[in-house]
């Protein structure tokens, strides 16, 4: 009686075994999770309700755009607003490293009390040198402190804080209401706006701050699209791992079969 000839298993036979079908099911679950995450990123990559063109150029009341202590929503960065209040005496301060049409200089700022125990930092105007800025701040202190004012300008996010120079602990080179608050007067239980207001019209002795309309926000977030593609690659990689593991097992069984066949022939 002739012994049936044996053949090594095929890759398809290995893949159809219960063990590898179970591994495939696990990979399907993982790939499904990755696909969901990719879709989630893609949905957030495209703004289906973009801000209308030119919306930042419509002058709106400050309180309609942002409230005290709130972060400025992205669609309203650079929004033109108007407000009124009273200048607080002693708080016309100078901020350095301010650029106006490419020229470096200084801003003169003030604390505008817009409501009871509520203030906003205002950048009033630009000066080319420190002497001019200090002189303008002194004039404002003499003429404007304690008087009411109506201000129109752009509301801009806080630039953050930085350590002052060691030789001048009161120097400021960023427009930060948090830093200004540390030098303001009458701040007990005071509510402060996180963003600041850049006035469009400077007082005498200062130059108008160059504050063009902000760039229109893109309706497509390419970073989110990149993340969505990454998740798609991860989903495909899950299937590749299954294929690679099954193929490695198949190659191992083929090698073992060939070794047994060679031993039998000897």
Image: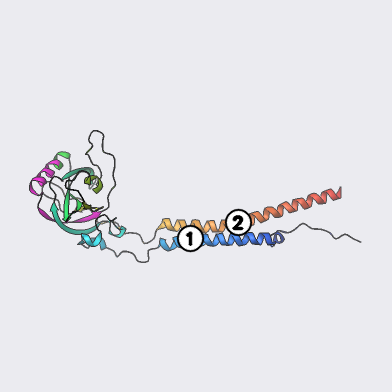
Looking at this rendering, what residue extends furthest in the top direction?
Answer: 167
Q: Is residue 64 above or below residue 94?
A: below
Q: Is residue 162 above or below residue 44?
A: above
Instruction: Indicate the secondary structure of the residue bearing disc 2.
Output: helix
Confirm whether the magenta stretch covers residue 84.
no
Tag on residue 171? none
Which quadrant of the figure has residue 22? bottom right
Position of residue 29 in the picture relative to residue 119 (left or right): right
Q: Picture coordinates of residue 234 (x, y %)?
A: 53, 56
Looking at this rendering, what residue extends furthest in the front direction?
Answer: 189
Tag on residue 38? 1
Q: Is residue 176 visible?
A: no
Q: Residue at x 71, y 53 (%)?
A: 251
User: Range of the magenta residues?
Assistant: 134-156
Looking at this rendering, what residue extends furthest in the bottom direction?
Answer: 49
Spatial CA distance of label 2 from label 1 is 18 Å
């Amino acid at each position: 009686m002739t012994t049936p000839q044996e053949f090594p298993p095929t890759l398809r036979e290995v893949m159809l075994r219960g063990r590898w079908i179970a591994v495939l099911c696990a990979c399907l679950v993982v790939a499904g999770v990755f696909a969901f995450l990719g879709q989630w990123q893609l949905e957030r990559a495209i703004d289906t309700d973009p801000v209308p063109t030119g919306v930042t150029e419509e002058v709106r009341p400050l309180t309609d755009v942002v409230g005290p202590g709130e972060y400025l929503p992205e669609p309203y960065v650079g929004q033109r607003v108007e407000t009124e209040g009273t200048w607080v005496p002693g708080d016309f301060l100078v901020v350095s490293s301010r650029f106006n049409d490419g020229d470096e200089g200084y801003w003169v700022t003030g604390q505008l009390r817009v409501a009871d125990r509520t203030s906003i930092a205002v950048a009033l105007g630009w000066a080319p040198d420190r002497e001019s800025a200090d002189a303008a701040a002194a004039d404002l202190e003499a003429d404007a402190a304690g008087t009411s004012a109506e201000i129109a300008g752009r509301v801009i996010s806080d630039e953050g804080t930085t350590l002052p120079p060691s030789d001048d602990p009161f120097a400021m080179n960023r427009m930060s209401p948090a830093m200004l608050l540390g030098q303001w007067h009458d701040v007990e239980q005071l509510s402060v706006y996180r963003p600041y207001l850049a006035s469009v019209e400077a007082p005498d002795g200062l130059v108008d701050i160059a504050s063009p309309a902000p760039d229109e926000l893109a309706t497509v977030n390419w970073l989110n699209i990149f993340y969505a593609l990454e998740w798609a690659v991860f989903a495909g990689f899950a299937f590749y791992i299954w294929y690679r593991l099954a193929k490695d097992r198949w190659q191992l069984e083929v090698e073992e079969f060939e070794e047994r066949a060679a031993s039998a022939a000897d």
